[in-house]
Amino acid sequence: MNQWDMNNDIERVLYSEKDIAEAAKRVGSQLAADYEGRTPVILSVLKGAVLWTVDVMRYMQYAEVEFIDVSSYHGGIASAGEVDLVVDLQTDIAGRDIIIMEDIVDTGRSLQFMKDLLEARGAKSVKVASLLDKKDGRVVEAHVDYVGFDVPKAFVVGYGLDYKQLYRNLPYVGVLKPSVYNPEHAGLVDTTDITPEH
Ligand code: IMP
């Protein structure tokens, strides 16, 4: 077995590359139909939603793309509660139809923060298309209009989703082995204190 292989860190695959490609086609085609005659602004949330964004937008028609980065995780596996605006979008969105592209909606805090921001700036409409919807994780009310998959309450990585900035480039979504974020499980001496919340 090649030790320098990220696949070894994955306990099980939840959504394969093929499953995700089908979901991107389904959501992108639905968006194309729903936004016919309009030119929405796709707002891709860095960094996790980049792969999902490019795959979904291939099925859409006229659309602009912008990026935003909000952070609530700070590199661990549990949400910190506060949301920071890390990278702001670079265009005036007053009067525009916005589609927020998310990798995953968990507590809903990031989404609520972005929706409030966009509404305060005069967006005409705001809809959400998320690869994953972790409904059981909700702390605040947050509705996802276009869902790739309803995901159980587990910490997942791949296809944009990271753990400590890694695994984003896996082509599928999977559950990380607990030994990766809790080295005690693997019998290693590293005592990094990260307690799983999910
Ligand atoms: P929320 O604000 O709690 O809804 O969290 C949204 C953000 O948390 C996502 O955009 C992800 O960056 C991160 N996140 C939530 N759950 C997971 C997970 O299972 N794996 C990786 N990142 C996650």
Image: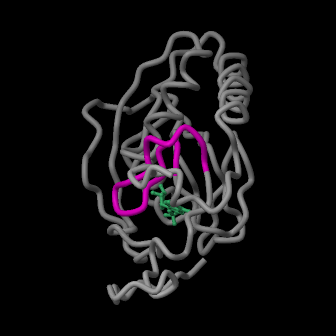
Which residue occupies the extreme front position in the image?
1
- Residue drawn at (56%, 64%) of the image: 176
Q: Main SS type for the magenta part?
A: loop
Instruction: Say left or right for 109 vs 76.
Output: right
Which residue is rendered at x = 48% and y = 17% of the image?
63
Report the front residue among 23 and 60: 23
- Position in image of residue 196 (x %, y %): 53, 81
Q: Which residue is drawn at 67% across and 51% down?
A: 13
Residue 139, image quadrant = bottom right
Residue 168: say if magenta: yes
Q: Of 38 and 29, which appears nearest the observer?
A: 29
Relative to 41, say whether 130 is above or below.
below
Question: Does residue 147 appear anywhere in the picture?
Answer: no
- Asked if residue 117 can be seen in this view, the reply is yes
Q: Quadrant for the C terminus, please.
A: bottom right
Of the pair 68 and 25, the residue shown nearer to us: 25
Q: Does the stretch in magenta take in 194?
A: no
Q: What stretch is highlighted in magenta?
A: 158-173
Where does the image place residue 137, in percent across and percent down from the top left? Answer: 64, 71
Instruction: Residue at 64%, 50% (x, y): give it.
Output: 132
**Residue 106 spot, x, y in % from top left:** 58, 64
Where residue 185 sits: x, y (%)? 52, 84
Residue 95, image quadrant: top left
